[in-house]
């Protein structure tokens, strides 16, 4: 148990977090793999901070490239995301991870680093001021050789970035990040 607390403390200390303590509404979702696509699109997510919005939009482009197994598109998206992360205080180590994905030699390496990137950005968006829309935290228990992996999405429908079309619907929604209004 102490080991879990130590790991959690390290993740919080090194994660990309916002400078403000803003409240967000979080709710556990009992949904498993969605079969009907939600109407949400990245444009339907509105964050108060423009740079945090840019980080979110870049993350979604990267995630979608991994979903579609588009290695070169993922490299480009990771490079662009690195720029937004570099300008966000507290996200310097996350920018390094994005850069690793930008210079990766294959999509398997990108997907491995995507786990760390996602963990950091989930922490950021849990503290971000969401003005409109819902950000879904999703989890695939089979990712990373059974260790699992999380990611963010603008819709409930599962589109797995760790496996793409090999196991597109493997996963479930674990949390929803919404406006506190």
Image: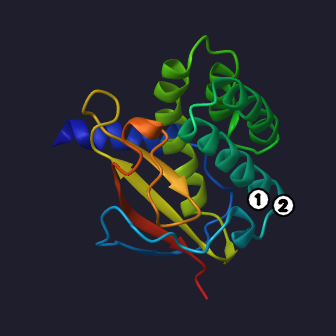
Residue identifier under label 1: 53
**In the figure, is residue 157 to the left or right of 77?**
left
Local secondary structure at mark 2? helix
| For residue 38, above or below residue 7 | below
Local secondary structure at mark 1? helix
| Residue at 41%, 66% in the rendered image | 175
**Residue 50, disc:** 2
**Residue 145, disc:** none
| For residue 85, above or below residue 60 | above
Q: Are marks 1 and 2 in contact (CB under 8 Å)?
A: yes
**In the figure, is residue 35 to the left or right of 30?**
right
| Residue at 64%, 38% in the rendered image | 65
Q: Mark 2 packing: few (<14 Cα in 10 Å), some, or many (20+)?
A: few
Q: Which quadrant of the view contains residue 131?
A: bottom right
x and y, in percent, of residue 21 in the image: 61, 67
Which quadrant would the N terminus be assigned to in this image?
top left
x and y, in percent, of residue 111 in the image: 50, 29
Q: Nearer the viewer, residue 123 or 76?
A: 76
| Residue at 81%, 54% in the rendered image | 51
Which quadrant would the C terminus be assigned to in this image?
bottom right
| Residue at 75%, 38% in the rendered image | 81
**In the figure, is residue 134 to the left or right of 86?**
left
State how the image is colored: rainbow
x and y, in percent, of residue 10 in the image: 42, 37
Q: Which residue sits furthest top?
A: 105
């Amino acid at each position: 148990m102490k080991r879990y607390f130590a790991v959690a403390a390290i993740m919080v200390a090194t994660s990309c977090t916002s400078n403000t303590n803003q409240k967000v509404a979080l709710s556990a979702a009992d949904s498993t793999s969605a079969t009907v696509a939600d109407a949400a699109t990245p444009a339907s997510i509105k964050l108060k901070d423009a740079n945090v919005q840019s980080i979110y939009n870049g993350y979604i482009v990267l995630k979608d490239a991994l979903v579609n197994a588009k290695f070169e598109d993922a490299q480009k998206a990771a490079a662009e995301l690195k720029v937004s992360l570099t300008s966000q205080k507290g996200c310097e180590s996350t920018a390094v991870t994005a850069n690793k994905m930008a210079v990766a030699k294959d999509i398997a390496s990108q997907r491995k680093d995507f786990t760390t990137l996602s963990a950091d950005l989930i922490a950021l968006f849990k503290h971000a001021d969401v003005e409109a829309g819902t950000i879904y935290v999703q989890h695939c228990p089979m990712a990373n050789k059974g260790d699992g992996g999380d990611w963010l999405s603008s819709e409930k429908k599962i589109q797995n970035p760790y496996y793409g079309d090999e196991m597109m619907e493997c996963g479930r929604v674990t949390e929803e990040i919404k406006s506190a209004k």
